[in-house]
Image: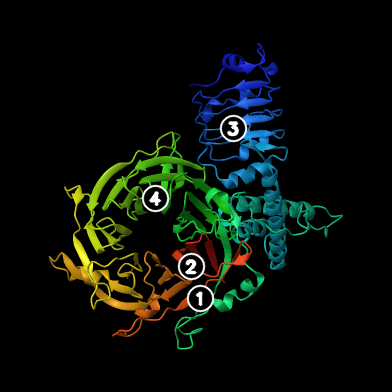
Amino acid sequence: MGPLSARLLMQRGRPKSDRLGKIRSLDLSGLELLSEHLDPKLLCRLTQLQELDLSNNQLETLPDNLGLSHLRVLRCANNQLGDVTALCQFPKLEELSLEGNPFLTVNDNLKVSFLLPTLRKVNGKDASSTYSQVENLNRELTSRVTAHWEKFMATLGPEEEAEKAQADFVKSAVRDVRYGPESLSEFTQWRVRMISEELVASSRTQVHEADSPEKPPEAGAAHKPRARLAALKRPDDVPLNLSPSKRACASPSAQVEGGPVAGSDGSQPALKLEPLHFLQCHSKNNSPQDLETQLWACAFEPAWEEGATSQTVATCGGEAVCVIDCQTGIVLHKYKAPGEEFFSVAWTALMVVTQAGHKKRWSVLAAAGLRGLVRLLHVRAGFCCGVIRAHKKAIATLCFSPAHETHLFTASYDKRIILWDIGMPNQDYEFQASQLLTLDTTSIPLRLCPVASCPDARLLAGCEGGCCCWDVRLDQPQKRRVCEVEFVFSEGSEASGRRVDGLAFVNEDVVASKGSGLGTICLWSWRQTWGGRGSQSTVAVVVLARLQWSPTELAYFSLSACPDKGIVLCGDEEGNVWLYDVSNILKQPPPLPAAPQAPTQILKWPQPWALGQAVTKTMVNTVVANASFTYLTALTDSNIVAIWGRL
């Protein structure tokens, strides 16, 4: 499609007229329009236009000066829009459609509500709840920026140049003023910049008003009562109540059990964590009575900036996958697949290049389970953009390769592990996956773990029959491979053939693994074990230490590691979370004690209330922390997502 013409506008406009100024409704959908095709000089002649349909095109932006001041209805669904700020040129807009623009996020929804105060419907839904959220955010941000301004100005000396100081204030406000969940940080920083620039402009005006030099800055809602950001959960997400008495004693219950307190022997002090949120967001048929759906896996979203950390976690169980903001407990997105039971989730971050050559970052979530399908979810846009028919039997677990963002391992009850390349999405945001390798196992694979020091060369798997390793190098000719090495654990603690249902790298060398019924977690050296294997196909691991864990005979409690902090985590059958400071344990002078090392801390189950009574006991199937160890998410056998926060 080339540039628009007056003739085309008259053909597609209503009512029919030979004058553009008479057209009140215009349909330009499905014309493969690019942003540069929207000629402002032509479109501004539509002086009476009230309804415009731009759906199903390839628009990345809207020109700033279209001049459609009477526009009331705008449809822009199924485009490639990446920004909504140009919508402020339509001050009378009442209805707006933006579905199917995968680069728009919840932050853009908030920007729309702020920019268009007359808007009644967005994507066919009432906009009032979003307005309420924006009003609360705006009120709190205005108050915080104003307080930051007063503090900043009080520190300035008389000799400092005003212009430079005010520019420095805007930078410091954007950097330092924070409020609300991380998922809304784009919107809040956008508003902080606007508010701080308004304060600076107001201050400059006052300097030139000699008759009122002491007049305080006009900061809009700065002096209105402060309001707390409401936790706007979706109607089908039922929060659990934590009794005031339990919250009051949360910190003492999180102290060390069976270990030193506050570093009395020179060790690291106990981490202080408190329970923040308890959610039933995976309930079958959205029923608050559901305390039976089992939750199996969770994973934190990759941080968007290097060195940053995420507070957004994906959880799965039953027929639902949920994406939750740990700070607020808000369920940001929810995906349901009736008839499915999800067992595993994994994130990857892709850099997509649009047709105009712009780079966009995508966070893609893979979810799989009972039906053997892998669903690739674009969570921020709210749709499934690809399905891989990976296995004929259930998928126990999956993980992305840390070396290749499009490489995905799936492990199934069919005793196979398959390496896929999900590829990059096409223009319709669809994935076409290709199979790269098939790895045969002798028992069901339960946990997957690319080797930290060589993730593109070796893959570890904890299986029903033990711990195995495969060569996954793609420059080798065989596309179907058997286990290269089987690892066995000495002294009868994890004999060959025993289930390994927990597996994680603590750092590039140290592996943590767990088997059922033994009451221990084993720490062993990958480097020493692999270096001493020779040509053997069965190798005894080089044990560094053993960690005391629950003596339960039950299986499938998954462990995890927080490598940046040197911490290992594992739940148990009583609802507790066991924490081990592995870095501190490994610093002890050799030889390490043969007896299992006690946990650094045990977080006791806080007993939230549901159905009018305390949930006194549950199994914690999985527990995962984000990279900075500021949030910890535990999933239970009783449909409870428990989120802890570090004090």
How far is the residue under mark 4 from the one under mark 3?
45 Å
**Disc 1 from disc 3: Cα separation:** 52 Å
The residue that mark 1 highlights is 271
Spot occupied by residue 335 in the image (x, y as percentages of width and height): 50, 46
Earlier-in-chain disc, 2 versus 4: 4
In the image, residue 463 lies at what x, y percent?
28, 61
* Residue 353 image offset from top left, x and y in percent: 42, 40
647 versus 484 height, above or below: below
Marks 4 and 3, the one that precedes in the sequence: 3
Query: Residue shown at 58%/63% (left/top)?
Result: 277
Which of the colour schemes (rainbow, by chain, secondary structure, one colour) is used? Answer: rainbow
**Mark toward the viewer: 4 or 3:** 4
Q: Are marks 1 and 2 in contact (CB under 8 Å)?
A: yes
State the residue in front, 15 or 334: 334
Please rate how many residues cluster around mark 2, counting C-alpha atoms within 10 Å: few if below 14, some from 14 to 19, many from 20: many
Neighbour class for label 4 at 10 Å: few (<14), some, many (≥20)? many
Q: In the rendered structure, which amino acid carries the disc numbered 4?
A: Gly
Number of residues whose C-alpha sits closer than 10 Å to that of mark 1, classed few (under 14), some (14–19) or many (20 or more): some
Amino acid carrying mark 1 in the image: Leu
Q: Which residue is mark 4?
A: 369
Among numbered discs 1 and 4, the one appearing first in the sequence: 1
* Distance from Cα at disc 3 to Cα at disc 2: 44 Å
Residue that mark 3 sits on: 63
Q: Which residue is mark 2?
A: 629
- Sequence-wise, the earlier of marks 3 and 2 is 3
- Give whichever of discs 1 and 2 has the lower sequence position: 1
Q: CA distance from mark 2 to mark 4?
A: 28 Å
Inter-mark Cα distance, 1 to 4: 34 Å
